[in-house]
Image: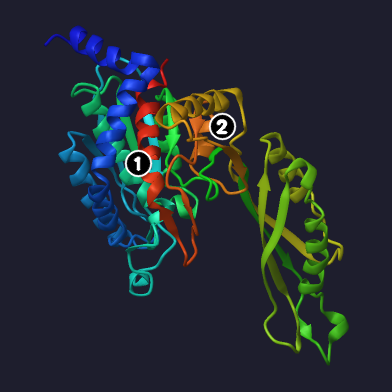
Amino acid sequence: MKTGKVLTRAMSRIEEKKGEGVLRAALRLIESRQKEMLHDLQGLVEFESPSSDKAAVDLLGAHMARQFADMAGEVTVHSAAAFGDHLQVDFVGVAKSKPVLLLGHFDTVWEIGTLKTMPFKIEKGRAWGPGVYDMKLGIVMMMHAIRALREASGGVLPYPVRVWLVTDEEVGSDSSRKITEQLAMDSAAVFVLEPSQGIDGAVKTWRKGVGGYTVKVAGKASHSGVDFEKGENAILELAKQITKIAGFTDLKRGITVNPGVISGGTRVNVVAAEASVAVDVRIEKLKDAALMEKKFRGLKPFNKKCKLEIEGGINRPPMERSEKVLKLYRRASELAREIDKNFVLKEKGTGGGSDGNFTAALGIPTLDGLGAVGEGAHAVHESALLSEIPRRTALLAGLIGTCFE
């Protein structure tokens, strides 16, 4: 069949009743495969994949590469020396357009051996286990949304789809950020399969930017009993600096500054020569990155005989609630109602960051939190609601198929 005829057939099905026909077909397919989806989820969860264990993460990556290849995806492995290798999977679409980018990660915060105390299980209407909610169910949803959309659209994808899964999101995305931004710039829209915000399943239309600073103080050591006055106490200087730094918080502007970890000194009978504090910084507006930089770099010692060293900065720009983001949210809300008249898709923001921060900051339309509905990210009660899996997966299929309208 000629390409033009294939595209016409696919597009006619996608556009039927503004996508309602293909959505219903996709939803039926997804509902019929719930057991298969849970089996796939169990497979991903039982490959434990802490960010710090490259060998373990690469085992999971190889497993997923085989699954995507079986779906006729073109798999590209991006090597990362210090982390697991990142996965790019491209699916051909009939239309000659930029792809939709499905963004996520397969590293987790859970160490090897966690399954012994947090085994994967289906109980009380939920799937439980390390990484279920953040965000291995989101990856399963990607796979089955693509599969269902292709089948519901007559065996073809109307538009190209690119999956990008990284292995260092939980620890800052240092090795993957550049590629994430490159792929985003070549994308029509980005859908982030991080978990939803809260048990009501809200998608995320804004996220705070994230950064960190380390303030180090160099003083002068001396014997605290014999030569007390000859020392310059770095801990005392740091305490004054921490009080000043805490004052950078401005809740009205959405700025929070948290001195989180402090260290200093060697022995109780020694005037401390060194001390430091690690500070977490969150901002709602990109312009406030420059403000925080100015404030931290402008710190001066209270004790002129002590020296300060400042390191760090904002490493994830904020995902602002822009018109491009809201356009995708409105489209998602329309599709949700077409899937189920009782499916009300809410929107929220969060102080946590994701790789969606990078793509949104580039001006690429981005919608985050499209993954699992549940609770307990990074906690022992991590779990995802089974009842929400079919329609959330169908929603993703609908977004992939109609975001170009």
Quadrant in the picture for the C terminus: top left
Seen in the image, is 290 located left or right of residue 233?
left
Residue highlighted by disc 1: 390
Residue at disc 1, secondary structure? helix
Residue 198 visible in the shown view? yes
Residue 161 percent across, percent down from the top left: 31, 28
Seen in the image, is 64 located left or right of residue 213?
left
Specify few, some or many for label 2: CA neighbours under 10 Å numbering under 14, 14-19, or 20 or more.
some
In the image, what residue type sits under mark 1?
Pro
Residue 108 percent across, percent down from the top left: 41, 58
In the image, what residue type sits under mark 2?
Ala
Question: Nearest the camera: 147 or 313?
Answer: 147
Q: Which image quadrant is residue 82 in?
A: bottom left
Question: Could you say which disc has been placed on residue 151 in the image?
Answer: none
Residue highlighted by disc 2: 361
Colour pattern: rainbow
Seen in the image, is 268 located left or right of residue 322?
right
Could you tell me which residue is drawn at 21 percent across and 52 percent down? 63
Q: Is residue 277 above or below residue 212?
A: below
Seen in the image, is 392 located left or right of residue 252?
left
Q: Is residue 289 above or below residue 268?
A: above
Residue 166 percent across, percent down from the top left: 37, 46
**Marks 2 and 1, how far apart in space?**
31 Å
Q: Is residue 117 above or below residue 174?
A: below
Could you tell me which residue is drawn at 77 percent across and 73 percent down? 235
Pointer 2 or 1: first along the chain: 2
Residue at disc 2, secondary structure? helix
Q: Residue furthest bottom?
A: 226
Residue 234 percent across, percent down from the top left: 77, 72
Specify few, some or many for label 1: CA neighbours under 10 Å numbering under 14, 14-19, or 20 or more.
many
